[in-house]
């Protein structure tokens, strides 16, 4: 195997930079910023890579760097809705020594190290930009919207040898474990995952429409993608919270029609701690439907007739009812994450109805010797691999998906890696989810 390094990542970024337009709102707020030339880009990435291998007081460095002139940031702004610029009176050389000193001061979840390109000196550190932690919500789930970043080069270092490169808030490439990845392995952007839950979303909209027709007042129309966004943020919160427990865990998602049979004696699994079939175990769907109704009724008099209420409206809403519902959804994600710390898997339906936890996967007569590793989010390109190198948790997930093709299994390892497993008909296919920061401090 030929390992890849910052030079390979730099070449990849140069090829993909212009293909990502960036944030339209950022383009309106900030001046256009060009990508540094290849030689400087290699220098910047190499410095970040070397810095990632260092430790400060026994802890690996985590930091974010943005390549932009200090003048483009307005002096009067600040979190939570803006960026707070703090410029040094004397600029510092951009090297691993200075980054090591600044990494703890420029806290990863809340700040960026500002770097500019001097025509003679090359890259140099000019200060710190406080962003606040809201930007993590797009990765770990959350309703609050983050202040926009300029469409500039951003490098995030989360683990030794792990670099993620973005154009503003949009990820372009990732260097990890000696491999360069594009955005193609963010499973939440896949069509197959969207389609897997499409019938459940339609079911919710049917319930919502019935309530809407019975309402005495007019309700706004909802964006069909609203509940898909909420589902995604729920799942991101669960995955991030499981990792924050530093324990690892397995989530098994099954069709609702399999719920009763899986709660009885069956050849697939035994659920040690089962929940009674009642409203509490179906709380997530109830919360989502309440969100839909509350959003459709909120500020209806200020909305245009043809405007759909969607995720942006949900993010920006100050309605106390919606705020409380969002907090309730957040608590559900932490509940599920906490259940995963018990030995065994958490089992839920596609409605996120909690069947129970502490589940042991059987499928003892099934032997899965190899799986298809997806090389893109739709598994159009795959690589057949032996399962000898993976642990018991992954092998049991592969066996279940072979025997129960309708199941989706999400395996979160203690090291922070996330794998989605499903049956693609011919193969049990695993998707290594790469768009995930291994950061616990937001919890």
Image (cartoon, rainbow, N blue to C red):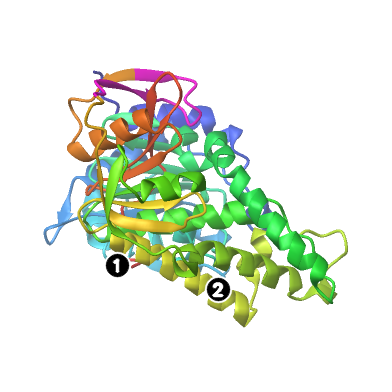
| 40 vs 200, nearest the viewer | 200
Asked whether disc 1 touches disc 2, contact meaning CB atoms under 8 Å apart, the reply is: no
- Residue position marked by numbered label 2 in the rendering: 325
Residue 372 drawn at (x, y percent): 36, 22
Q: Residue at x 46, y 57 (%)?
A: 353
Residue at the far left in the pictured view: 58
Q: Which residues are magenta?
A: 367-383
Residue 72 drawn at (x, y percent): 57, 59
- Residue position marked by numbered label 1 in the rendering: 105
For numbered disc 2, what is the local secondary structure?
Answer: helix
Quarter holding residue 313 = bottom right
Quarter the N terminus occupies: top left
Q: Residue at x 22, y 40 (%)?
A: 393
Which of discs 1 and 2 lies nearer the camera? The answer is 2
The answer to whether any part of residue 109 appears in the image is no
Q: Is residue 35 above or below residue 227?
A: above
Q: Give the left or right position of residue 10, taking residue 207 as reference.
A: left
Q: Name the N-terminal-most of marks 1 and 2.
A: 1
Report how many numbered discs are placed on residues in the image: 2
Bin the neighbour count of mark 2 within 10 Å (Cα to Cα): few under 14, some 14-19, many 20 and up. Answer: some
Q: Is residue 52 above or below residue 375?
A: below
**3D distance between C-alphas at marks 1 and 2:** 35 Å
Q: Is residue 331 above or below residue 92?
A: below
Q: Give the left or right position of residue 191, taking residue 48 as reference.
A: right
Quarter the C terminus occupies: bottom left
Bin the neighbour count of mark 1 within 10 Å (Cα to Cα): few under 14, some 14-19, many 20 and up. Answer: some
């Amino acid at each position: 195997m030929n390992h890849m390094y910052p030079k390979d990542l730099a070449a990849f970024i140069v090829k993909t930079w212009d293909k990502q337009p960036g944030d339209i709102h950022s383009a309106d707020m900030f001046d256009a910023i060009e990508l540094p030339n290849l030689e400087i880009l290699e220098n910047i990435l190499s410095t970040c890579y070397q810095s990632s291998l260092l430790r400060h007081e026994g802890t690996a460095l985590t930091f974010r760097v943005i390549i932009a002139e200090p003048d483009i940031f307005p002096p009067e702004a600040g979190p939570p809705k803006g960026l707070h610029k703090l410029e040094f009176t004397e600029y510092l050389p951009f090297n691993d020594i200075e980054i090591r000193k600044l990494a703890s001061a420029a806290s990863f979840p809340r700040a960026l190290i500002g770097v500019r390109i001097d025509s003679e000196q090359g890259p140099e550190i000019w200060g710190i930009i406080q962003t606040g932690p809201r930007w993590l919500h797009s990765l770990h789930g959350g309703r609050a919207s983050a202040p926009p970043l300029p469409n500039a080069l951003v490098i995030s270092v989360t683990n030794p040898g792990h670099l993620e490169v973005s154009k503003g808030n949009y990820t372009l490439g990732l260097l990890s474990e000696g491999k360069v990845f594009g955005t193609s392995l963010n499973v939440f952007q896949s069509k197959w995952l969207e389609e897997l839950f499409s019938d459940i979303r339609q079911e919710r909209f049917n319930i919502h429409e019935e309530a809407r027709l019975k309402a005495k007042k007019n309700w706004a129309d909802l964006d069909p993608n609203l509940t898909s966004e909420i589902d995604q943020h729920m799942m991101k919160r669960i995955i991030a919270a499981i990792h924050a427990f530093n324990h690892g865990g397995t989530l098994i998602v099954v069709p609702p029609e399999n719920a009763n049979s899986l709660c009885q004696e069956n050849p697939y699994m035994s659920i040690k701690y089962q929940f009674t079939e009642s409203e509490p175990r179906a709380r997530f769907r109830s919360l989502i439907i309440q969100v839909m109704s509350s959003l459709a009724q909120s500020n209806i008099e200020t909305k245009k007739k043809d405007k759909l209420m969607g995720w942006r409206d949900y993010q920006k809403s100050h309605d106390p009812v919606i705020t409380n519902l969002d907090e309730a959804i957040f608590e559900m994600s932490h509940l599920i994450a906490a259940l995963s710390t018990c030995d065994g898997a958490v089992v839920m339906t596609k409605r996120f109805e909690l069947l129970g936890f502490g589940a042991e996967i059987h499928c003892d007569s099934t032997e899965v010797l190899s799986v298809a590793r997806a090389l893109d989010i739709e598994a159009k390109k795959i690589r057949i691999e032996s399962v000898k190198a993976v642990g018991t948790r992954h092998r049991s997930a592969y066996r279940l998906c072979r025997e129960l093709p309708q199941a989706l299994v999400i395996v979160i390892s203690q090291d922070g890696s996330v794998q989605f497993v499903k049956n693609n008909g011919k193969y049990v296919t695993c998707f290594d989810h790469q768009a995930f920061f291994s950061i616990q401090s937001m919890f």
